[in-house]
């Protein structure tokens, strides 16, 4: 059913600073898209079936703009190190297990199950270097009805031999075959080119991936300016680049003519920020990961004020949890500490902006996604916050804020992607 009416307490962004709250109101969904939102249902829609969610909250589905599916298995573990040591100690050994399809089947089954029961409807996901396991993940996400980009990861240096492409040519051949196999195979899932980050990829691999990007017109995702040691390493690896973003740009892997996501951007300088703006690069802000790995706090309010494109991300397993509600409140909390302790020039993030980042900000990577404005794809989650009991009367705005801070994905009653009900 892709044409219907849904009723409840609607909460959605009109812009980054405007949160629309419509109590006991209606959304008319036609062919999977929002045809209109109404406080009283117009007569012309009276014949359509109505899904009445009573006093529950109806929010746009959320976009997790950066998450590592193979790291879900060790979420909440190993938070005692910074990025580069963390990768070598915890991440690479775990990711090597996805060579075995049996393990991948169990682990990815668990990941997709959790994602399905979260407020996330769309995600940009890193898999591992292994093609069969990556395709298994894509199939599971597609079967669940989640709309995702998934990347077979490329890495051919600075990792143990057990988690490294055999050769550059082999990596490019595998990646091209995988792109051809998966470009049209699924209904909801698409491939995205995924160099892990520059320290993991030789120059010839990066140039080869840029050729594949141009040949198949696919989007790109990677990591950028997350950690001080990483950035110092880039200066050694790419001495002719002006900054880390410029190094991607020189390889032809920094957006511009095509969609591109860069995770973190905690320490991006002014030039790097300007280049991201020029190229329309999406920043995947990952506040919990940036705290856990002691990377720092990105000036996300500054990015927004300056017109950069930003979404929110869990970055599991840098982040410990798949909940985008938690990511919202972590973003606010981190921005407050950054402001108090470090830089009064960038104000803390408002609740409105955090909500925007989780919905419309990241949703924009998928088109008109993440709001209930007319014409948007109807991605929605229905939250029953009755278990978060309170003696006093609360407005819908207050209930929404509490639902985020007390984030409990068990409150999810139903979930829709592009008008299709996939849960509840
Ligand atoms: N940089 C390169 N690989 C990774 C990863 O797996 N997680 C994070 N947070 N940063 C990275
Ligand atoms: Fe990451």
Image (cartoon, rainbow, N blue to C red):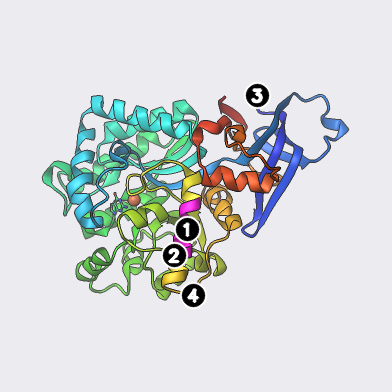
289 on left or right of 273: left
Q: What residue would you read off at disc 3?
A: 1
Q: Secondary structure at mark 1?
A: helix
423 on left or right of 106: right
Q: Mark 3: few, some, or many residues within 10 Å (few <14, many ≥20)?
A: few
Q: Earlier in the sequence, mark 2 or mark 3?
A: 3
123 on left or right of 94: right
Closer mark to the observer between disc 1 and disc 3: 1
Question: Gap between marks 1 and 3, in whole Å?
Answer: 40 Å
Specify start and end residues of the magenta stretch as a single range.
Answer: 329-336
Residue 104 drawn above or below residue 173:
above
Q: What residue would you read off at disc 4?
A: 344
Q: Earlier in the sequence, mark 4 or mark 2?
A: 2
Residue 205 place in picture, x, y as percent:
24, 54
Mark 1 and ligand 1: say if the CB distance to the nearest ligand atom is below 8 Å.
no
Q: Mark 4: few, some, or many residues within 10 Å (few <14, many ≥20)?
A: few
Question: Gap between marks 2 and 3, in whole Å?
Answer: 46 Å
Question: Gap between marks 4 and 3, in whole Å?
Answer: 50 Å
């Amino acid at each position: 059913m892709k044409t219907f009416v849904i009723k409840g307490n609607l909460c959605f962004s009109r812009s980054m600073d405007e949160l629309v709250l419509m109590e006991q109101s209606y959304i008319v969904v036609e062919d999977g898209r929002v045809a209109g939102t109404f406080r009283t249902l117009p007569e012309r829609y009276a014949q359509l079936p109505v899904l009445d969610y009573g006093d529950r909250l109806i929010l746009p589905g959320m976009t997790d703009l950066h998450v590592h599916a193979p790291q879900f298995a060790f979420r909440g573990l190993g938070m005692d190190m910074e990025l580069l040591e963390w990768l070598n100690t915890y991440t690479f050994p775990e990711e090597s297990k996805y060579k075995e399809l049996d393990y991948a089947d169990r682990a990815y089954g668990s990941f997709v199950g959790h994602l399905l029961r979260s407020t996330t409807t769309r995600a940009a996901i890193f898999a591992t270097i292994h093609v069969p396991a990556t395709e298994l993940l894509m199939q599971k996400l597609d079967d669940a009805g989640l709309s995702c980009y998934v990347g077979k990861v490329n890495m051919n240096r600075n990792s143990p031999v057990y988690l490294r492409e055999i050769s550059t040519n082999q990596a490019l051949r595998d990646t091209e075959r995988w792109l051809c196999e998966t470009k049209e195979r699924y209904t909801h899932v698409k491939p995205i080119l995924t160099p892990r980050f520059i320290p993991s990829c030789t120059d010839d691999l990066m140039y080869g991936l840029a050729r594949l990007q141009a040949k198949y017109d696919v989007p790109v995702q990677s990591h950028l300016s997350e950690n001080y040691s990483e950035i110092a390493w880039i200066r050694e690896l790419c001495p002719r680049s002006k900054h880390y973003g410029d190094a991607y740009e020189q390889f032809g892997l920094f957006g511009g003519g095509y969609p591109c996501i860069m995770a973190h951007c905690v320490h991006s300088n002014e030039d790097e920020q300007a280049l991201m703006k020029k190229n329309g690069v999406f920043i995947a802000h990952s506040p919990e990961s940036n705290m856990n790995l002691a990377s720092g706090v990105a000036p996300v309010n500054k990015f927004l004020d300056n017109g950069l494109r930003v979404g929110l991300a869990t970055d599991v397993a840098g982040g410990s949890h798949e909940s985008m509600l938690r990511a919202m409140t972590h973003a606010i909390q981190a921005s407050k500490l950054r402001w108090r302790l470090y830089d009064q020039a960038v104000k803390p993030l408002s609740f409105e902006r955090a909500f925007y980042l989780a919905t419309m900000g990241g949703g924009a990577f998928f088109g008109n996604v993440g709001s209930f404005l007319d014409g948007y794809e109807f991605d929605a989650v229905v939250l029953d916050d009755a278990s978060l009991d309170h003696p006093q009367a609360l407005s819908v705005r207050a209930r929404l804020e509490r639902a985020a801070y007390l984030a409990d994905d068990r409150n999810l009653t139903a979930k829709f992607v592009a008008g299709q009900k996939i849960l509840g």
